[in-house]
Image (tube, rainbow, N blue to C red):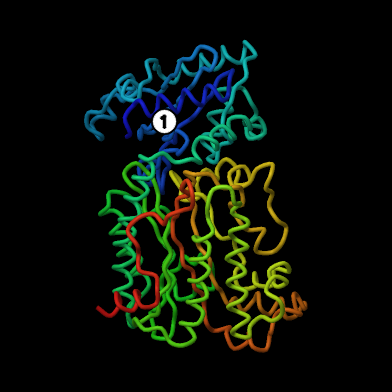
Amino acid sequence: MFKKETYIARREQLRKDIGHGLIIIPGNHEAPCNYKDNTYWFRQDSTFLYFFGLQREDLVGVLDCDSGKDYIFANDYDIDDIIWTGPLPSVKELAASVGVDNSGDLKDLAEYCCKTVAESRRVHYIPPYRSDITRQLSELLGIKYAAVNRYASMDLILACVKQRAVKSAEEIEEIEKAIATAYNMHVGAMKMAMPGRYEYELAGFMEGEAWKGNGPVSFPVIMTVHGETLHNHGHNNRLEVGRMLVMDAGCETAMNYCSDITRSVPVGGRFNDRQRSIYQIVLDANLEAARVTRPGITYKEVHQAASRVLAQGYKDLGILKGNVDDIVAAGAHSLLMPHGLGHMMGLDVHDMENYGQINVGYDNETRPSEQFGLGSLRCGRRLLPGYVITDEPGCYFIPALIDKWHAEGTCKDFVNFDELEKWKDFGGIRIEDDILVTDNGCRVLGKPIPKTIAEIEQVMNN
C-alpha cells in the first residue's frame, strides 16, 4: 500500500467532488474456479484499491459525504477460517491502516444502507461488472437485480475518472516497476524465439517472469505467429523461420499497477526484406505518435498523425494509392490497422474501462468516430499532464477482411487489391509502449525495451 495519507486525500477529494449522499465502493469476492473452495487468484476491484488500498476479499467501503465519515464493512475471520489462512488483521485494524476510523460487519452495513434508503438520501455507486456485486447492491439498496446498473451514478463515474486519470509520482513509480518486469519478460522471450520452439514455451516463460516480479500477468499473454488475429490467445504453433512473432504481454506489481508492452520479432532473429519493410513502417508510426503527444492535443489527433505515417508507408510499397490525407480521411489504411492507437493504463491494463469506455476515453468535447478503425480508438480525449496511455500502432494482413473489402469495393480508389494479394500470408506486427504525458510533451516509461530492427537482431543473436 501507499501511505495512509494518500488514501485519505483521495477519499476527501471524492467526497468534495460528489458533494452529498452516500458512496458505496464494494471490493471483490473470491470467485470459484471449479468448486467453491478452489478459487481463482484473487484480484481486488481497482476502484476499491484506489480509495482504500486493501487486498482482502469481501470488504465494502462507504464514504458519507454529509457526515464526512468513512467506513469499512466486512465480517471478521473466525477460527474455521484461521485454520486455513493463519492469523489475519481484524476489519477494524485494516480500516485503521488506511485512515478509516469507522468499521463494522456486513449486518451493520445492511442496517446502514436500509436507514439511508429510508431517509431518501442519494446513494452513489459504480456500475458493477460482476454478478455477485450486482446481487449484493440489489440486496443492500432494495433495487431489482436487473435495474442495478440503471441506477449507477454518473456523477461518481466522472469524479473517479477525473481523479484516476492523472497519475501521481508514486503511481508512475509503480507502473515503471511493472515495465521493468515486462523488460525481462520481453527480452527473455526474444532470445527464445527460435525455430523449433512452441509459442506456449515463450508464453510460460513470460508468466514466470511476471511472478518473479511479485505479480501476475496483467492480461492473458498474446504470443502468436498469427499476428493478423489481433488478440490471439492460442499458443500451440511451432515457430518457423519466415514468420513474425507478436508478443503482447504485461504484468502487475504487488499493488496491481500494470504494464502493457508489445514487441514483434522475426523467428530466428533476422528480418527478411518483407518483414523489414512492414516493421519499419509500424515503428515509424509508433515514434511519430510519441513525437506529437503532448498536453492539449487530443489522442484522436495523435492517432491520425500515426495513421498518416502508416498510409505513406503502404503507399510507398504500392499497397495503397492516392493522396495520403485522402487515404486517411477515407479510412482506407484501417484495412491494415482496424483498431485505435491506444488506451489509458494504470491500476487496470485498460484503465477504468469498467466505468464505460466512452466515459474514460472521451468527453463532451471529443466523441467517438463511426469510421471503421478510428471508431475502435479507445482513448480520443484531449491529453493532460499525468495521463498514462499506450502507443500501439500495428499492421495486420487479415485475409477475410481483405477479401470482404475487395468483394464489396470498399475504398477501391485507394487500395491496390492486386498488390495486397501478395501479402495475405504475412501475418501481423504490433509495437506498443506505455507513455506518460508530461508538462510539455511525453516520455516512454521504463527501461527501453529493444524495438529498432538493429536492437532486436542484436538481442536475438547475442
Q: Residue at x 45, y 26 (%)?
A: 60
Give the left or right position of residue 383, taking residue 218 as reference: right
Q: Position of residue 31 (x, y in %)?
A: 43, 42
Q: Position of residue 101 (x, y in %)?
A: 37, 15
Relative to 148, say whether 190 is above or below. Answer: below
Relative to 414, say whether 133 is above or below. Answer: above
Q: Residues within 10 Å of mark 1 (few under 14, many from 20)?
A: some
- Circle 1: element type: loop
Residue 355 falls in image quadrant: top right
Relative to 271, say whether 23 is above or below. Answer: above
* Amino acid on which disc 1 is placed: Asp
Q: Nearer the viewer, residue 46 or 146?
A: 46
How many numbered circles does the render carry?
1
Residue 409 falls in image quadrant: bottom right
Residue under circle 1?
Answer: 58
Relative to 328, say whether 61 is above or below. Answer: above
Give the left or right position of residue 219, taking residue 414 as reference: left
Q: Nearer the viewer, residue 128 or 251?
A: 251
Q: Residue at x 22, y 28 (%)?
A: 87
Q: Nearer the viewer, residue 29 or 161?
A: 161
Q: Position of residue 118 (x, y in %)?
A: 62, 12
